[in-house]
Image (cartoon, rainbow, N blue to C red):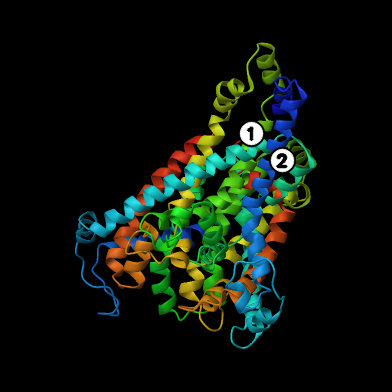
């Protein structure tokens, strides 16, 4: 660690941009959250109404619906991503031609825009037309009549799919990295002691992977809690409000109902949760 | 590792065969899971409307969809240019700022370093929807709606913190000794950054640049709200192709290929550093 005259100069441009583009607008949102402003009624923000918007949020059924939906969404995405990731990591460990092919493919889903993923899966799920719908109808004929994205429960699952379709493979890559870091001596000692493959996996590998799994849970939670793009492209919150995540709810209140004051309060509530979560994340990562 | 652990229980040829078949099936399953949507969209782009309504792999190939996409109806050639302008501008601004900040965070003694790091982390995870409200008002007030400037600014909110964090993790792993030697020889910090650290940090810099490019290219919410005729990006173009009802899925697929292929190529280029970038080099 050295000292220098230029250290603040180096920090200034980057952090100035961060401050001005991210932190300063937040103050505007905080300010707006205490005001009443419905854009279609008046061109400028209205009177200050204290915590009314926040109280409205806490007593709004739609708000709590959005919270529940978002929670369910995060759980589904995280669980599937890590399960898929574990499976991929364990399978890809052995170096063969197939494993090289797989490893090359694993980053592609993540590079594809969420919007495109949403439309693609929506297309593939179309009743009668879509290839996924056709496959599923053959595999499980008792769900043949189900309109996947129009079903109150299935819709949320399918909105989760494009997310864990990308995060599963990515988690696989990350877990693979962690797996490869485990020294082979531990496995040799285990097999010398007569441990079966299954035993080795549960009692040795899993505990050693715990840090990475924890990082993944936090990371995936932080990314999926903000879900908006897929809701807009696949279901627009529907059917009814069955897939209205918190972010989409805020968007609808702000840009469809035009109640900017209320939307700001909601946004602040979400931000507080996220700040807390990213603080947790920082405790895990910043180790000095 | 897992290979050596498995070979000692698969002692007879029959078990080995089961293992191999299982392994191959599992791998093919993974390839199918990851690759199938990519494959399907790719072939759908070349299908006629009548073929896209049937979920078939036998069809009459056509390039009509691409012609429609590039026609005046959707103007995709102009949209690609728009996206390129925004993405390149974002990368050109982000990378130097992020590198300088990362270098300072890594090398210099800073009393509030932890605060700065938490700040970077927290801003990365702000939901974009939160910032749309003040930005919408701001851009409306200053007639910045539908400008490149506006799009570059909002994209910077995501790329700068992310790149700074990524490069911080990266620069931290570079050896300090060479820099010390440079200092002893009388180099200034600026020279050290430019002539010593920069070449060594190239993989990280390229990763940050490409990550930022991908983030800006795929950006949806801000583009949807802040662009219109003039600066529309390919993503919003995709939304327009889809429309409200009677969605022309074959045209959506064609647009989809244009949107996705550049990103697939770029992510392929940095695939080695992808994982490090996301764990920000902190979890080894």
With B8 as the anchor, is A211 left or right in this view?
left
What residue is rendered at 56% in x and 83% in y? B230
Mark carried by residue B105: none
Residue A165 spot, x, y in % from top left: 56, 52
**Residue found at the very far top of the displayed protein:** A193
* Element type where label 2 sits in the image: helix
The residue wearing badge 2 is: B24
Rendered-image quadrant of the N terminus of chain A? top right
The residue wearing badge 1 is: A178
Crowdedness of circle 1 by 10 Å Cα count: few (<14), some, many (20+)? many
The verdict on a common chain for dots 1 and 2 is no
| Distance (Cα) linking label 1 and label 2 | 23 Å
Q: Is residue A159 visible?
A: yes
Observer-nearest of B248 and A185: B248
Residue A111: quadrant of the picture: bottom right
Asked if residue B9 is positioned above or below residue A253 in the image, the reply reads: above
What residue is rendered at 71% in x and 45% in y? A103
Rendered-image quadrant of the C terminus of chain A? top right
What residue is rendered at 29% in x and 55% in y? A65
With A58 as the anchor, is B238 left or right in this view?
right
Residue B130 spot, x, y in % from top left: 40, 61
Residue A144 spot, x, y in % from top left: 46, 59
Residue B211 spot, x, y in % from top left: 64, 56
Observer-nearest of B259 and B193: B259
* Element type where label 1 sits in the image: helix
With B199 as the anchor, is B257 left or right in this view?
left
Asked if residue B245 is positioned above or below residue B167 in the image, the reply reads: below
Pinpoint the chain carrying mark 1: A
């Amino acid at each position: 660690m050295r000292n220098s005259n230029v250290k603040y100069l180096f920090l200034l441009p980057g952090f100035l941009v961060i401050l001005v583009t991210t932190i300063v607008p937040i103050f505007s949102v905080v300010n707006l959250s205490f005001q009443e402003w419905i854009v279609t009624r008046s061109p400028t923000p209205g009177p200050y109404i204290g915590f009314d918007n926040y109280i409205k949020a806490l007593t709004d059924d739609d708000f709590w619906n959005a919270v529940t939906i978002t929670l369910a969404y995060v759980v589904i995405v995280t669980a599937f991503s890590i399960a898929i990731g574990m499976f991929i990591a364990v399978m890809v460990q052995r170096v063969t031609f197939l494993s090289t092919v797989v490893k090359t493919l694993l980053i592609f889903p993540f590079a594809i825009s969420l919007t495109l993923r949403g439309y693609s899966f929506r297309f593939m799920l179309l009743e009668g037309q879509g290839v996924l719908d056709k496959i599923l109808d053959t595999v499980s004929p008792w769900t043949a009549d189900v309109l996947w994205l129009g079903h109150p429960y299935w819709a949320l699952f399918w909105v989760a799919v494009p997310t864990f379709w990308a995060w599963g493979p990515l988690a696989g890559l990350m877990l693979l990295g962690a797996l490869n870091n485990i020294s082979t001596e531990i496995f040799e000692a285990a097999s010398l002691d007569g441990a079966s493959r299954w035993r080795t996996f549960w009692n040795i590998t899993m505990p050693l992977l715990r840090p990475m799994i924890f990082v993944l849970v936090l990371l995936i939670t932080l990314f999926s809690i903000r879900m908006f793009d897929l809701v807009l492209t696949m279901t627009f919150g529907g059917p009814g409000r069955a897939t209205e995540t918190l972010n989409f709810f805020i968007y609808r209140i702000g840009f469809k109902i035009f109640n900017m004051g209320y939307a700001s309060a909601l946004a602040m509530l979400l931000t507080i949760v996220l700040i807390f979560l990213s603080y947790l994340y920082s405790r895990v990562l910043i180790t000095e | 590792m897992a290979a050596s652990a498995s070979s000692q229980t698969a002692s007879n040829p029959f078990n080995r065969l089961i293992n191999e078949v299982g392994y191959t099936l599992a791998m093919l399953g993974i390839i199918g899971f990851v690759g199938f949507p990519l494959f399907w969209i790719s072939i759908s782009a070349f299908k006629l409307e009548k073929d896209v309504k049937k979920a078939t792999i036998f069809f009459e190939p056509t390039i009509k969809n691409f012609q429609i996409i590039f026609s005046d109806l959707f103007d995709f050639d102009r949209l690609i240019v728009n996206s390129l302008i925004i993405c390149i501008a974002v990368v050109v601004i982000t990378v130097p700022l992020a590198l300088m900040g990362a270098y300072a965070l890594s090398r210099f003694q800073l009393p509030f370093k932890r605060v700065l790091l938490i700040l970077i982390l927290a801003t990365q995870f702000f939901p974009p929807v939160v910032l749309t409200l003040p930005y919408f008002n701001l851009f409306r007030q200053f007639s910045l709606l539908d400008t490149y400037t506006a799009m570059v600014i909002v994209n910077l909110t995501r790329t700068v913190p992310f790149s700074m964090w990524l490069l911080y993790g990266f620069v931290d792993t570079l050896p300090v000794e060479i820099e010390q030697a440079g200092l002893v020889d009388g180099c200034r910090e600026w020279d050290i950054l430019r002539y010593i650290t920069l070449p060594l940090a190239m993989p990280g810099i390229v990763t940050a640049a490409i990550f930022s490019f991908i983030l800006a290219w795929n950006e949806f919410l801000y583009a949807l709200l802040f662009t219109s005729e003039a600066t529309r990006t390919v993503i919003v173009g995709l939304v327009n192709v889809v429309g409200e009802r009677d969605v022309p899925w074959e045209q959506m697929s064609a647009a989809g290929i244009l949107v996705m292929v550049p990103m697939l190529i770029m992510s392929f280029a940095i695939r080695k550093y992808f994982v490090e970038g996301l764990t920000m080099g902190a979890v080894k």
